[in-house]
Amino acid sequence: MKELLEYMVKELVDNPDDVDIEEEEEDEKTIIFKLKVAEEDLGKVIGKKGRTANALRIVMRAASAKRGKSSIVKIID
C-alpha cells in the first residue's frame, strides 16, 4: 500500500525524489502513513481546499479496506 501512495504522490509533485513516506502500525488494523514532500510541492499534494489530500486519503482507505485494515495519511510539513 505504501507503494500505491508513493506512486500517486510522485506523479503529482515536481520533485519526486523528495517524497518520503514513513509507515507505522498504530494497532493490528490501522496503518499510519506519514508523507513528507518538498516545501514547494506541499500545495500540490494538499490541493485547493484540501481536495487532493482528501482524494489520496479516500483511495488509501479503499485499498486498505480491501485488506481488512484502515489507514491514516498524515501530511507532514
Image (spheres, rainbow, N blue to C red):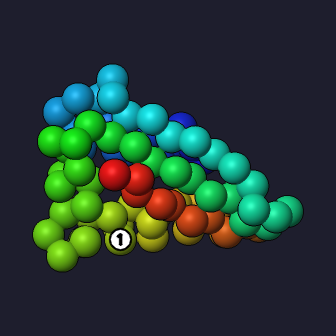
Question: Farthest residue in the bottom direction?
Answer: 49
Question: Farthest residue in the right direction?
Answer: 28
Along the horizontal axis of the image, is 37 left or right of 7? left
36 w.r.t. 53: above or below: above
Position of residue 36 measured from the top left corner of the image (x, y, whole percent): 40, 43
Tell me, yes or no, if residue 56 can be seen here: yes
Q: Residue at x 57, y 65 (%)?
A: 72
Q: Residue at x 19, y 63 (%)?
A: 47
38 w.r.t. 51: above or below: above
Position of residue 46 measured from the top left corner of the image (x, y, whole percent): 25, 61
32 w.r.t. 68: above or below: above
Q: Residue at x 56, y 53 (%)?
A: 33
Q: Residue at x 52, y 51 (%)?
A: 34
Position of residue 37 measured from the top left corner of the image (x, y, whole percent): 33, 40
Tell me, yes or no, if residue 7 can be seen here: no
Quick one: 51 or 19, which is closer to the camera? 19
Q: Which residue is mark 1?
A: 54
Position of residue 32 measured from the top left corner of the image (x, y, whole percent): 62, 58
